[in-house]
């Protein structure tokens, strides 16, 4: 016998019994994005590797260790998208989507791929919902993006989450800060973890993100970026905070929040929930003012965020926020004799034309078994086509809640109100 083939580690099948939860989430994403005037963008799930290496940063964990990169049969280096922002920017430039559009408001939902060590809330194929506000350099758009993210969180009834926010300033502020940070970290180099010593040379801001206890101690005393913001950078950050406060959106300033992607400038933020354990961040984003140029476009300052859908699901599960599934069918059709199956299909057609769900047996089971199935599927009504009904050209309609049962003609069935 052949050995069964298992799915790839860190990937999940979506079972039919859970599909409604994903449909519920997708519907929330779509309808709330729509309320903000955001339009959906879909791009291919693979891109030329350069799209990501040029934007996310050569020295980030994502590009260094986590990308699914392969050479295709034509010799081109291809990568399964680890995130959307870079791919979306590539698409906006290529399709000239900002032409005639002062601001492009876009959202997306789909699968992403990172070769990480799988654990709770960390997968190799995961899903993100996200939104990007393209072409406004102003803090109002940072606010709009955070406002949209918060509306999604609220729309899912998630409470007690935390939003951390920081500013990485403009390039001049960041360069100034980086130099000072490197000086400080160099003076404590021998106490840093091996990883952080390497990062000190390649991507020093990421040392602040390290979870190693010895690194945490050193970064606790490190200079903080907020002290290095120039006027333009601090004005921008002040305005974002002012709009959040005025709109009752809670936040916590965390000067060590740097995020794992290199394209950010000014505002960065992250959403956390303590029911997630060590992978406590279920979303994040920020402003990226230089990304369009890095990918060969004209300057186009923009801001966006993404949320991990599997992590949102964990939050919903832990807080009992998953809605009850709807019954599988509204009406189940029970048919006694296979000879009368045509009538059963006709009745099913009538029900479906009324935008109700109808199902019937395809295994030639007994009437008793068919009734059991009707109950299992949560049918509110059962249509019975016994030998007697069939001979008279009628059906019996049973209301499951009351047990009431009446004979009814097919044309009356079409007029019946199933509410
Ligand atoms: P990110 O923080 O890398 O940002 O990912 C966003 C979210 O995706 C995370 O907060 C997490 O919930 C989820 N996520 C990431 N990796 C995994 C994984 N291996 N398994 C499960 N969930 C995961 C970005 O991707 C940026 N593109 C966000 C952004 C949009 N910035 C500006 N615009």
Image (cartoon, rainbow, N blue to C red):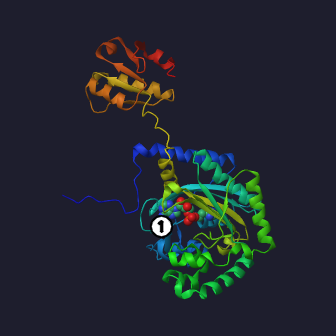
For the residue pair 225 and 146, the one nearer the viewer reads as 225
Is residue 102 visible in this depiction of the protein? no
Please, which residue is most extreme toward the left here?
Answer: 1
Residue bearing mark 1: 114
Label count reads 1
Q: Nearer the viewer, residue 213 or 361?
A: 213
Q: Residue at x 34, y 14 (%)?
A: 389
Q: Position of residue 41 (x, y in %)?
A: 61, 56
Which residue is at 57% across, 71% downward? 260
Q: Quadrant of ligand 1?
A: bottom right
Q: Quadrant of residue 52 in the image?
A: bottom right
**Is 9 on the left-hand or right-hand side of 158?**
left
Number of other residues with Cα within 10 Å of mark 1, as a class: few under 14, some 14 to 19, many 20 or more: many
| Left or right: residue 72 compared with residue 231 | left
Q: Is residue 419 above or below residue 178?
A: above
Q: Residue 411 or 242: which is nearer the viewer?
A: 242
- Residue 376 screen position, x and y as percent: 35, 31
Q: In the displayed structure, would residue 121 be above or below residue 390? A: below
Residue at the image point whose x is 48% and y is 63% from the top: 278
Q: Report the front residue among 193 and 312.
A: 193
- Where, quadrant-wise, is the N terminus in this rendering? bottom left
- Confirm or reject: label 1 Cβ below 8 Å from ligand 1: yes
Query: Disc 1 on helix, strand or loop?
Result: loop
211 above or below 38? Answer: below
| Residue depicted at x 53% and y 85% | 191
* Residue 128 location (% of width, % of height): 54, 57
């Amino acid at each position: 016998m052949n050995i069964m083939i298992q799915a790839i580690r860190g990937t999940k099948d979506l079972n039919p019994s859970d599909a409604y939860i994903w449909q519920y989430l997708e519907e929330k994403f779509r309808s709330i994005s729509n309320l903000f005037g955001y339009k959906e963008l879909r791009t291919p799930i693979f891109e030329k590797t350069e799209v990501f290496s040029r934007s996310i940063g050569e020295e980030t964990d994502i590009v260094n260790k986590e990308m699914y990169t392969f050479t295709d049969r034509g010799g081109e280096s291809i990568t399964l998208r680890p995130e959307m922002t870079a791919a979306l920017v590539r698409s906006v430039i290529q399709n000239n989507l900002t032409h005639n559009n002062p601001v492009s408001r876009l959202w997306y939902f789909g699968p992403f791929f990172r070769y990480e060590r799988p654990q709770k809330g960390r997968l190799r194929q995961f899903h993100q919902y996200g939104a990007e506000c393209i072409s406004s350099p102003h803090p109002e758009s940072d606010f709009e993006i955070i406002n949209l993210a918060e509306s999604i969180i609220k729309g899912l009834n998630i409470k007690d989450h935390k939003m951390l926010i920081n500013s990485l300033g403009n390039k001049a502020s960041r360069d100034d800060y980086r130099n000072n940070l490197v000086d400080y970290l160099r003076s404590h180099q021998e106490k840093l973890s091996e990883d952080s010593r390497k990062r000190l040379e390649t991507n020093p801001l990421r040392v602040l993100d390290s979870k190693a206890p010895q690194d945490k101690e050193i970064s606790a005393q490190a200079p903080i970026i907020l002290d290095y913001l120039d006027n333009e950078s601090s004005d921008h950050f002040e305005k974002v905070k002012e709009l959040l406060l005025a709109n009752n959106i809670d936040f916590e300033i965390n000067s060590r929040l740097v995020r794992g992607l290199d394209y950010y400038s000014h505002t960065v933020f992250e959403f956390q929930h303590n029911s997630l354990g060590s992978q406590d961040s279920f979303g994040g984003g920020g402003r990226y003012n230089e990304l369009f140029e890095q990918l060969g476009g004209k300057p186009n300052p923009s801001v966006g965020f993404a949320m991990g859908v599997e992590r949102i699901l964990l939050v919903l599960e832990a807080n009992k926020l998953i809605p009850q599934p709807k019954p599988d069918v509204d009406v189940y059709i029970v048919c006694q004799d296979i000879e009368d199956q045509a009538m059963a299909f006709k009745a099913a057609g009538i029900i479906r034309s009324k935008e109700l769900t109808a199902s019937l047996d395809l295994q030639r089971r007994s009437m008793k078994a068919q009734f059991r199935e009707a109950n299992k599927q949560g049918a509110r009504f059962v249509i019975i086509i016994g030998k007697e009904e069939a001979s008279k050209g009628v059906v019996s309609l049973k209301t499951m809640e009351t047990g009431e049962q009446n004979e009814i003609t097919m044309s009356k069935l079409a007029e019946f109100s199933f509410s």
